Amino acid sequence: MTARALAVLGTGSDVGKSLVTAGLCRLLHRTGVRVAPFKAQNMSLNSFVTPDGLEIGRAQALQAEACGLSPHVDMNPILLKPESDRCSQVVVLGKALAKQEASAYYDERPRLWSVVTDSYARLSRQYDVMVIEGAGSAAEVNLRKMDLVNWPVVEFADAQVLLVADIDRGGVFAQVVGTLDLLEPAERARVCGIIINKFRGDATLFADGVDFLESRTGIPVLGVVPFLRDLMLDQEDSLDLVRHQQTSFASDRINIAVILLPHISNFTDFNALAAEKDVALKYVSTPSALVDADSVIIPGSKNTLADLSYLRERGFAALLDNHLQGRRELIGICGGYQMLGRRITDPDCVEEGGTGCGLGYLNTETELTKKKYTAQVEAYPTDFFPTGQGLVRGYQIHMGVTRRVNERPCFRLRRHSVLSEDGPQSFAAHTEEVDGAIRHDGLVWGTYIHGVFDEPGFRRAWLNRARERKGLLLLDSHTSKSVTARLQGEIDRWADHLSRNVDLSCLLQ
């Protein structure tokens, strides 16, 4: 291994490790350094498909983009996708291997550790610097023997450590001091700096706090990073959804309600929609919140049958009938698409086994299968959508086959990378040349394509169709193109913000 290594560890979950890692990657990339991200083990329902059809955490895809690289499975060799409080799907080197409880997973540590070290070694031979992201807290003392992602990786890579704390949640002094006091002496010696993240207000008022932390710990505070409002970068977990639950619907906007399922996955599908100036997008957890929605979206789910039962138990299903009677739209993405059909069968107990009646809005049937399908895709909308909307680009991650009985497809696939039994095949042909299903009136449709709204042409054409139904003037396509351009520049805005507020000279040295 030749690469120098910096590890970004945290005092807890959601302190900002992923974004700090992405920002550092971008700043190093700007200086001409060949840099790559690495997170040995990620637990998230937000995932991404690499160009060769393998699955990794969405955060590592963002970090790869920050480095000017295509996402690669070695950047996140192990991905855990929770299916319940006790059980997760285990994805190793981009392929789903098993569904395991924590105790069984920890028994696999020796084998998994070799996967981690092999992936890191392959990357470190290709780059000058590796920026490693940790998981959870740097001081998970009860998990130290089973750890695959924090200190064993730091020691293997001989990395220096940057400790990130979140002042927004309170208790930052206890976070930092308590974390450092729980570290072994050799671990603490690797900590070269502290970042206080998500500060609101006048940072000069925290000068005494900086002095206290530095005198108490003997470690420099490299920066106090102000909370950056309206940052539209993909987040790793659903804690970021809280701010979208407070959105208010308005008569001059397209009001979109995304149902907050218990096992929601890939909620980044809707970031581009939320950024549009004529959209009010809200994640809803009660049926009454659907009343004023122009469009309702049932998102992806890691447990389709359980979330389908949740919709009925909470009363969402009855409200959806009223929603459609008002000539408003209903959309399903991936697991949500499966729920829109008439029946879902699970003969191999991929989830909970048995058969579930779908919502019945599409004449489709889905059979859940053990084989997981992952692919990047490009597709053209069918004639049921407005003309001139252009190409759709995204990715598919699903376990199950959906059969259209007499519904038309939504999209015609142009090309895609697909993971076959023999390994990745770049832009291989697939037996299914189309995707999704759309009802005869166009008001109910579903697709397996994650990121279906990311391309500005289709997004604006779809929004204009909703504006026309609502009696609003149509907006020019440049409106959405400017949104996409702004989203593409967010990583640089974040990197600039980090550079202004953190003394990076010692890290670069």
Image (cartoon, rainbow, N blue to C red):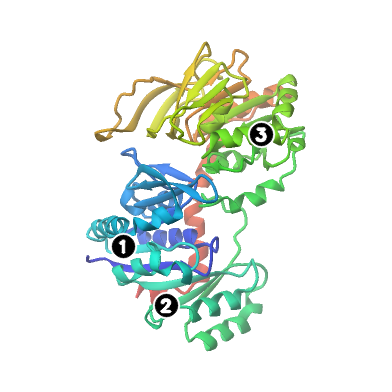
Per the image, label 3 sits on a secondary structure element best described as helix
Instruction: Name the kind of residue labelled 3 in the image.
Output: Leu
Closer to the camera: disc 1 or disc 2? 2
Q: Which of the 4 image quarters holds residue 127?
A: bottom left
Instruction: Tell me the kind of residue under disc 1.
Output: Val
Name which of mark 1 and mark 3 comes first in the sequence: 1
- Would you name the residue on which mark 1 appears? 33
Q: Above or below — where is 205 with respect to 347?
A: below
- On the image, numbered disc 3 is attached to which residue? 311
User: Which x, y percent locates residue 493?
Assistant: 51, 56
Q: Eyeballing the image, is 487 above or below 310?
A: below
**Cα–Cα gap, marks 3 and 2:** 47 Å
* Comparing labels 1 and 3, the label whose residue is closer to the camera: 3
Residue 157: x %, y % from top left: 30, 68
Inspect this view and state whether residue 478 appears. Answer: no
Q: CA distance from mark 1 to mark 3?
A: 49 Å
Identify whether 270 is placed above or below 59: above
Q: Which mark is residue 191?
A: 2
Secondary structure found at label 2 = strand
Rendered residue at 36%/57% (across/down): 107
Nearest the viewer among 121 and 295 is 121
Tell me the crowding category of disc 2: few under 14, some 14 to 19, or many 20 or more residues within 10 angstroms, Cα based.
Answer: many
Quarter of the image with the N terminus is bottom left
Disc 1 to disc 2, C-alpha distance: 22 Å
Going from N to C along the chain, the mark reached first, 3 or 2, is: 2
> Is the residue 381 above or below the residue 149 in the image?
above
Q: Is residue 447 left or right of residue 252?
A: left
Left or right: where does residue 428 sit relative to residue 267? left
Q: Which mark is residue 212?
A: none
Residue 434 visible in the current orientation: yes
